[in-house]
Image (cartoon, rainbow, N blue to C red):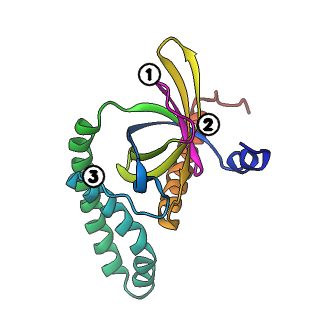
Amino acid sequence: MSIQDENDRREYYRIEDTIALEFTPLRGAQATAGDELHDNSPLFNLLSDLHLLEYESQHLLRHIAEKDRSLANYLKIINKRVDLLGQAVAQNLLRDIGAARKVTLSEGGMSFIHQQALTEGEHLALKLVLMPQALGLLLRGKVVHSQPLAEQQYEIGIEFEALSETQRQLLARHILQRQALERRQARDQQPPTAK
């Protein structure tokens, strides 16, 4: 990896997070970054589509709110109901994907501990469910490092590839929300200052 690539990866803010993660190797034509990934899980696709539609419709809701507050408030309630359904779908999906794991996440990629080494340069289909909003993302990634830590443990570094602008924005929003939560928790744990 060149110094420029390393600097580009470092410009993104990283967070420690716990997510559901499933990945599969991409082979042959699938490995080319231009092709769109498809998942054969209807629940995962539904969850992903719900969040993409919600993100894409935010600007419309702001325009409606400028003209008709009652309608905007009603639409916000409908949106919350859809979010609740999405969370129920996510609970079923989490049983399929498996236990959540700790990762270090940024807009540019992620790292995690895995029981097996992966091949550097290998292309992967990454299925992520980010909590608590149950955001489902299907992303492309490339293994940038696979370093042994201990017996049967490897640190895997993944660089995201060919993110759409919507996917990047959803990741950025999740990271900002986690940062805000961490700051609030740190502030709440500080002892009160004497006056």
Residue type at mark 2? Arg
Residue at image mark 3? 44
- The image quarter in which residue 189 lies: top right
Q: Which mark is residue 90?
A: none
Instruction: Assign a secondary structure to mark 1.
Output: loop
Label 3, label 2: how far apart the Cα atoms are: 36 Å
Relative to 98, residue 61 above or below: below
| Residue at the image point whose x is 52% and y is 33% from the top | 119
- Quarter holding the N terminus is top right
Instruction: From the top left corner, tell me how far across and down residue 76 is, in percent.
Output: 33, 69
Label 3 vs label 2, nearer the camera:
3
- Per the rendered image, the range of residues in magenta is 104-121
User: Is residue 189 in view from this perspective?
Assistant: yes
Contact? badges 2 and 1 (CB < 8 Å): no
Label 1, label 3: how far apart the Cα atoms are: 25 Å
Residue at image mark 1? 115
Instruction: Assign a secondary structure to mark 3.
Output: helix
User: As drawn, is 101 to the left or to the right of 162?
Assistant: left
Residue type at mark 3? Phe
| Residue that lies at the very extreme toward the top in this rendered image | 151
Pick the front one: 33 or 99: 33
- Magenta includes 99? no
- Magenta includes 108? yes
| Residue that lies at the very extreme toward the right in this rendered image | 3
Instruction: From the top left corner, tell me how far across and down residue 10 is, in percent.
Output: 71, 45
Residue at image mark 2? 187
Instruction: From the top left corner, tell me how far across and down residue 24 is, in percent.
Output: 37, 41
- Quarter holding the C terminus is top right
Label 2, label 1: how far apart the Cα atoms are: 36 Å
